[in-house]
């Protein structure tokens, strides 16, 4: 009988803990460990990303691969109601990309399940095409208005996920964790730009809201060289001069390779000069 009471009391003690663990948590800034948000680069680089169903700014539905036509994908995860880091990151990347470059697509994806196409369009006209105005809801007459949609995004894609399931599958596949803070009424998430190869594998993460244009271009080239071709020989040569430093999150000049190559180059020049003078001496004596 005593053992029965013992197990009953024990089960009551652990029941609240078990029940709480089944409820999705929202967090405050005080109880969040920043390490939870870190992306394990060694684990995810080289792995295949989930190919989600998206709805772009025009209302067209397609998969990520379908939208990007098998090209390199530069992916930025954000949410439209963000008032801080997201707009800064999006505006910075807009300045870096070449919209006419057909070798890659820059894909801006909202991970907020409550974001709608109107939210996406309002964000676009607030932070990308600031000279144009788009209003989904007129403040005076209460009637929906769509003045116009973007005419030419070039290699930029703005989209939302089809549903919450697609959000989870994709963010899990790239190691992107995020939480909603009730106190701050915002999402807590890593600020990163994800580079995905044409075959759909993670090739690089660049962290922070801003980074050097050279780092961006090198990451695009790195993502694009999974298959050797003569057309990419310049990319191979350029990347040989740089090494990605995981501790700083930046590309560093590769002195280990450059110095020996410089030595070989100088030796070759010296040999050519000696041969030239030797031939000139022979001509004079002849």
Image (cartoon, rainbow, N blue to C red):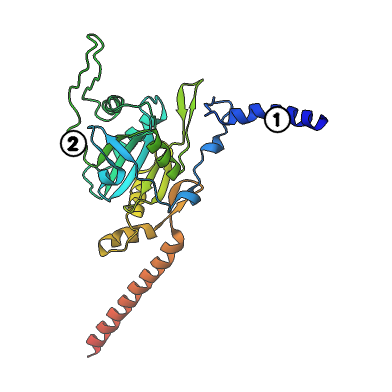
Q: Dot 2 lies on which element?
A: loop
Residue 235 falls left or right of residue 27: left
Q: Which residue is mark 2?
A: 152
Residue closest to the eye, 7 or 263: 7
Q: Dot 1 lies on which element?
A: helix
Q: In the displayed structure, would residue 180 be above or below residue 153?
A: above
Residue closest to the eye, 163 or 104: 163
Q: What whole-number distance in Å separates the C-alpha atoms at marks 2 and 1?
A: 62 Å
Residue closest to the eye, 193 or 65: 65
Q: Looking at the picture, how far across and down is residue 208, in whole percent?
A: 43, 38
Q: Looking at the picture, how far across and down is residue 231, in whole percent?
A: 25, 61
Residue visible at 60% across and 28% down? 19
Q: Looking at the picture, how far across and down is residue 61, in whole percent?
A: 26, 37
Quarter where residue 122 is shown: top left
Q: Looking at the picture, how far across and down is residue 182, in whole percent?
A: 50, 21
Residue visible at 17% across and 25% down? 148
């Amino acid at each position: 009988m005593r053992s029965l009471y013992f197990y009953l009391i024990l089960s009551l003690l652990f029941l609240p803990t078990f029940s709480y663990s089944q409820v999705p948590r929202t967090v405050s800034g005080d109880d969040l460990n920043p390490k939870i948000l870190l992306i394990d680069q060694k684990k995810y680089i080289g792995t295949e990303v989930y190919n989600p169903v998206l709805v772009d700014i025009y209302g067209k539905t397609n998969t990520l691969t379908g939208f990007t036509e098998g090209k390199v994908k530069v992916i930025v995860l954000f949410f439209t109601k963000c008032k801080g880091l997201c707009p800064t990151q999006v505006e910075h990347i807009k300045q870096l990309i070449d919209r006419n470059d057909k070798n890659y697509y820059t894909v801006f994806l909202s991970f907020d399940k409550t974001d709608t196409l109107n939210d996406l369009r309002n964000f676009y006209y607030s932070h990308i095409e600031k000279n144009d105005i788009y209003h989904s809801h007129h403040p005076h007459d209460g009637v929906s208005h769509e003045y116009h949609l973007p005419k030419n995004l070039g290699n930029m894609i703005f989209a939302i996920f089809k549903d919450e399931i697609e959000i989870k599958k994709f963010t899990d596949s790239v190691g992107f964790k995020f939480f909603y803070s009730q106190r701050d009424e915002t999402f807590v998430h890593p600020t990163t730009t994800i580079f995905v190869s044409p075959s759909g594998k993670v090739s690089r993460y660049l962290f922070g809201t801003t980074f050097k244009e050279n780092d961006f271009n090198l990451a695009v080239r790195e993502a694009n060289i999974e298959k050797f071709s003569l057309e990419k020989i310049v990319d191979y040569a350029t990347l040989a001069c740089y090494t990605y430093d995981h501790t700083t999150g930046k590309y560093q000049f590769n002195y280990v390779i450059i110095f020996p190559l410089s030595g070989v180059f100088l030796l070759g020049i010296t040999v050519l000069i000696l041969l030239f003078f030797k031939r000139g001496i022979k001509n004079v004596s002849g």
